[in-house]
Image: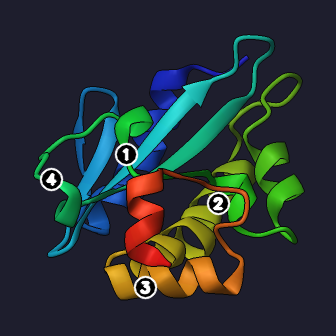
Amino acid sequence: MIDKKKLKTLFSQELRAAGFAAKSGSWYRDTEETVQVINLQKSNYDDSYFLNLAIWMKQLGECDYPKEQHCHVRIRAGAVSAEQGSEVARLLDFGSASLDESREAALRSMLTQLVLPFLANAATLDGLRQLLASGTLKNAFVRGNARAILE
């Protein structure tokens, strides 16, 4: 079993460098059109975690630090890429593995190669429209009022 604090420290290092700030157990980045949220959630059933990604669309209201579950667009990191989904799940499953140097490097790579590029594309409404049209958000929860703007 891994210490969640150690995992959050690793994520904080990468996310701070990308312009995110930690608050109330999540990381936030404010862009011109959106507020982006990253939340690390521990599974209730085993020693695995989920990395939740969420977008608050400012056009639908101002909110500096929205809770992940209140955001207009929500997706798990593993659902961003069908090809990488099982690898993300494996990296975040600490049932029998520890956070060694190789796993740390792989988690950092997952953030810089998958999560941050996705969020860069989701920083604007046009970017979100493109993600929706391309099918990248097919496994995302998109609130009705947000879908009306994006479609």
Q: In the image shown, does 127 or 144 lie closer to the viewer?
A: 144
**How far apart are the alpha carbons under marks 4 and 3?**
19 Å
| Mark-to-mark CA distance, 3 and 1 | 16 Å
Q: Residue at x 50, y 78 (%)?
A: 151
Is any part of residue 110 visible from this angle?
yes
Mark 4 or mark 3, which has the lower sequence index? 4
Q: In the rendered structure, which amino acid carries the disc numbered 2?
A: Ala
Q: Nearer the observer, disc 1 or disc 2?
A: 1
Question: Looking at the rendered structure, which numbered label has been put on residue 127?
Answer: 3
x then y, percent, for residue 35: 25, 58
Considering only order in the chain, which callout, 1 or 4, is on the residue closer to the N terminus?
A: 4
Figure check: 4 above or below 76: above
Looking at the image, is mark 3 or mark 2 earlier in the sequence? 2
Relative side of 38 to 109, left or right: left
Q: In whole angstroms, how far apart are the C-alphas of marks 3 and 2?
A: 28 Å
Q: CA distance from mark 4 to mark 2?
A: 37 Å
Mark 1 and mark 2 lie on one chain; the one further toward the N terminus is: 1
Disc 4 to disc 1, C-alpha distance = 11 Å
Q: Amino acid at mark 1?
A: Cys
Q: Are marks 3 and 1 in contact (CB under 8 Å)?
A: no
Binning the other alpha carbons within 10 Å of mark 4 as few (below 14), some (14 to 19) or many (20 upward) gives few
For mark 1, give the secondary structure: loop
- Residue placed under numbered mark 4 in the picture: 61
Residue 71's disc number = 1
Disc 2, SS: helix
Residue at 40% from the left image edge and 38% from the top image edge: 68
Q: Quadrant of residue 14?
A: bottom left
Disc 4 vs disc 1: which is toward the camera? Answer: 4
Which element is circle 4 on?
A: loop
User: Mark number for residue 105?
Assistant: 2
Question: Which quadrant of the figure has residue 26?
Answer: top left
- Please report contact status of discs 4 and 1: CB closer than 8 Å, yes or no: no
